[in-house]
Image: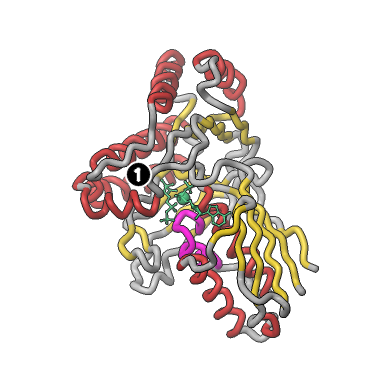
Amino acid sequence: MLSVTCTAPVNIAVIKYWGKRNEELILPLNDSISATLSTEHLCTTTTITASPNFTENKITLNGVEESFENKRLLRCLSEVRRRADEHDKCRKEILKWNIHVVTENNFPTAAGLASSASGYACLVYALACLYGIEKEELSAIARQGSGSACRSLYSGFVQWKKGCHDNGSDSIAIQIVPETHWPEMRILILVVNDAKKKTSSTHGMSTSVKTSELLKYRVSSCVDKNIEALTKALHDKDFELFGKITMQDSNQFHAVCLDTYPPCVYMNDISHSIVNVIHQYNKVHGEIKVAYTFDAGPNACLYLLEKDVPDVLRIINYAFPNDNVKSVEYIKGIPVDLPESGTD
Ligand code: ADP
Ligand code: DP6
Ligand code: CO
């Protein structure tokens, strides 16, 4: 019997991935950029055990057994096993053993806080540890679990390059800058609603690709410019430019969701009041101090610099005193690499 346990962090996109050109291989229509958080806060922990005595494969997510007949899960497993089979140093003797996967998210699952990203990054990393394959270049495998997962394998600010090959070999994540490049950067997560969303990201973006004209315009005329400008803002540590592009991209992404037919409504009234509060706050200060971004859910992620955290927390607690915003997570740092917590 062999068992490994790994932990992987979520990542929060500042230029969103929304739309696939190949649903099977999970190839995106556009590049995206995100920051990977620290595993101290929002993360997935996954234990995988392989044994010659297991009669079947099993997976338990947050204490509930799920079907193993999940295309994405099976694809990640077969891709890792294929690589293990090709390399001499890998643990080939266990390739035929069944596995039991036990995975837990320490934050709301399927609520727009990127659980599929930390979930599949953790699964693929743990499988790589189990079979003893190289940890480099795992992002193309994690991508086939959930697109956003490829970015969680790197720390700091990360770009998922859409690539141009039909087989997806160059649709991979790369680090733009490490977390040490801009150590003052902080992220606050405002949990507005922790319920499972009605429309999964996968289904929502597939409908957008089929029905949204605005998505076509976003992909053809907006994203590349914003990727270039945001990369420059990161290199120059220019928060004004970083914040503006981040908020504009989030707004455009949610406009695409509304332009989808039937529309995908992910933000709620509280999300919109958070947007208003942030714009008022920035206006009073005459500069962008805080930038909001919303994934496919109502919960807000705020990017800001460390010096402004106490004042922004004070404003948020003042503006949302009645527990409308259920909890505020203070993400201390943008993170470290994936730790491996042990092999028996
Ligand atoms: P989110 O915004 O949380 O990423 P998605 O709709 O993209 O929501 O994906 C949610 C799905 O991701 C879950 O229904 C589940 O299938 C998968 N998922 C979430 N966490 C894990 C995990 N720890 N291990 C494996 N799969 C996971
Ligand atoms: C709004 O990666 O969850 O969070 O590839 O179908 O699993 P699948 O979708 P997923 O989509 C994430 C969408 C997003 C934006 C982003 O993270 O870039
Ligand atoms: Co997701």
**Total of numbered circles in the picture?**
1
The three-letter amino acid code for the residue at tag 1 is Asn
In the picture shown, does residue 167 fall above or below 259? below
**Is residue 70 shown in magenta?**
no
> Crowding at label 1, few (<14), some or many (≥20) Cα neighbours within 10 Å?
many
* Residue depicted at x 22% and y 50%: 216
Q: Which is more toward the observer, 195 or 307?
A: 195
- Quadrant occupied by the C terminus: bottom right
**Residue 293 lies in quadrant:** top left
**Residue 48 lies in quadrant:** bottom right
Q: Tag 1's secondary structure? A: helix
Which is the main secondary structure of the residues drawn in magenta? helix
- The spot of residue 201 in percent (x, y) is 40, 49
- The spot of residue 186 in percent (x, y) is 58, 34
* Residue depicted at x 52% and y 36%: 194
- The spot of residue 245 in percent (x, y) is 38, 37
* Residue depicted at x 64% and y 81%: 95
- Quadrant occupied by the N terminus: bottom right
* Residue depicted at x 54% and y 49%: 177
In the picture shown, does residue 295 fall above or below 273? below
Residue stretch rendered in magenta on the structure: 138-150
Q: Which is more toward the observer, 222 or 253?
A: 253
What residue is pinned by disc 1?
226
